[in-house]
Amino acid sequence: MEIVTNDLSKFGYRELAEAGELLKEYANKPADFLSDGLTINFNPNSGYVFLSDEDYNVGVMTAEGIVQFFSCPQCGYEGTNEEAEAEGKSFIKYSGYCSSECEEENK
């Protein structure tokens, strides 16, 4: 089974509705962190529907609109920066890593 697909025939009704909301939001307020090669994707394992560009930047829908979704390259921790901050981490503060420890391990 594919981990991620952009084949809309593999999206269920809920995922198609989420994709529609994401596209509607993007049409009204494009996310500045997303660039060329933009696709809408679905991860059947997690149920997430998201936007992704050719540089693997990921955008997810939250109550605030489309926000960046991160994955720490050191430890694999994933989430939005808001979710990370709720756990005492910050992808923004540590240049894409979730913590100072992960950032330091890659210097």
Image (spheres, grey):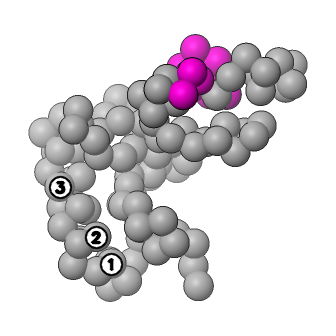
**What numbered label is drawn on residue 21?**
3
Is residue 102 positioned above or below 67 on the image? above
What residue is at 23 percent from the left and 72 percent from the top?
A: 14
Residue 54 visible, this angle: yes
Query: Mark 1: few, some, or many residues within 10 Å (few <14, many ≥20)?
Result: many
Q: Where is residue 92 in the image (x, y as percent from the top left)?
A: 54, 20
What's under tag 2, amino acid-wise?
Answer: Glu
What's under tag 3, amino acid-wise?
Answer: Glu
Which residue is labeled 1 in the image? Answer: 11
- Residue in the foreground of this view, choosing between 98 and 24: 98
Q: For the residues marked 1 and 2, what is the alpha-carbon distance in whole angstroms?
A: 5 Å
What residue is at 67 percent from the left and 28 percent from the top?
A: 97
Q: Write down the region rendered in magenta.
A: 87-97
Residue 48 forms part of the magenta stretch:
no
Q: Is the magenta stretch mostly helix, strand or loop?
A: loop
Q: For the residues marked 3 and 1, what is the alpha-carbon distance in whole angstroms?
A: 14 Å
76 left or right of 6 in image: right
73 left or right of 11 in image: right
- Residue in the foreground of this view, choosing between 29 and 50: 50
Query: Mark 3: few, some, or many residues within 10 Å (few <14, many ≥20)?
Result: some
Residue at far front of view: 87
Q: What element carries label 3?
A: helix
**What numbered label is drawn on residue 71?**
none
Q: Which of marks 3 and 1 is nearer the N terminus?
A: 1
What residue is at 40 percent from the left and 61 percent from the top?
A: 48
Q: Where is residue 39 in the image (x, y as percent from the top left)?
A: 39, 58
Which residue is labeled 2 in the image? Answer: 15
Q: Is mark 1 on a helix, strand or loop?
A: loop
